[in-house]
Amino acid sequence: MQNSLKRRIDLADLTANNIGVFRTLHQVLFPITYNEKFYEESLNIGELAKLAYFNDICVGCIRCQLEDEKLYLMTLGVLAAYRCIGIGQKLLDHILEHAQKLNIKSIYLHVWTENKDAIEWYTKRKFHILETLPNYYTKIQPGTAHVLSRNIIDK
């Protein structure tokens, strides 16, 4: 394989030096606005918040939160031009492996019901729809969200 065709995907911790990139990715990737507290807390949760780099270009991120024996996947996103090459999977795998070490039993998230690509992506990775919540989102229409979940050990 030629050097120009090699793909290198790396994950990086959040720091004061790259939190701006994390913030920009959230503004570009997600239809809701996160407050300053979200970003401040993201700096202090270690393995539960990561940036993804493709050949040294920051193209994705993930942010989770521990809730008892569950893990809430708050955000997972990859820039459109870099999707379908394993970056999202690498971010998810990292979180699943970390959760296993913490003896977390399950992971769940909310997905806008109109985001068919995300719903398909998660269901291919053993997530299933637990319930549908009307009026979950207030700034996008329709405001309906699916709650998707899966067991951590089902890798």
Image: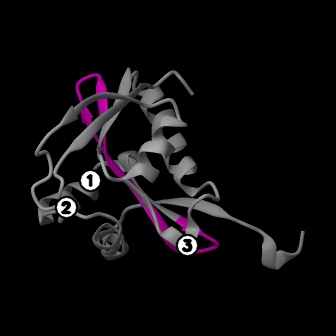
Rendered image quadrant of residue 23: bottom left
Q: Amino acid at mark 1?
A: Asn
Q: Is 65 inside the magenta-drawn segment?
A: yes
Q: Residues within 10 Å of mark 3 (few under 14, many from 20)?
A: few
Q: Is residue 101 above or below residue 11?
A: above
Q: CA distance from mark 1 to mark 2?
A: 7 Å
Rendered image quadrant of residue 24: bottom left
- Asked whether the beta carbons under mark 1 and mark 2 sit within 8 Å of each other, the answer is yes
Element at badge 2? helix
Foreground label between 1 and 3: 3
Q: Is residue 111 left or right of residue 51?
A: left
Q: Is 73 inside the magenta-drawn segment?
A: yes
Mark earlier in primary sequence (3, 2): 2
Q: Position of residue 106 (x, y in %)?
A: 37, 25
Mark earlier in primary sequence (1, 3): 1
Q: Residue at x 12, y 62 (%)?
A: 139
- The tag on residue 44 is 1
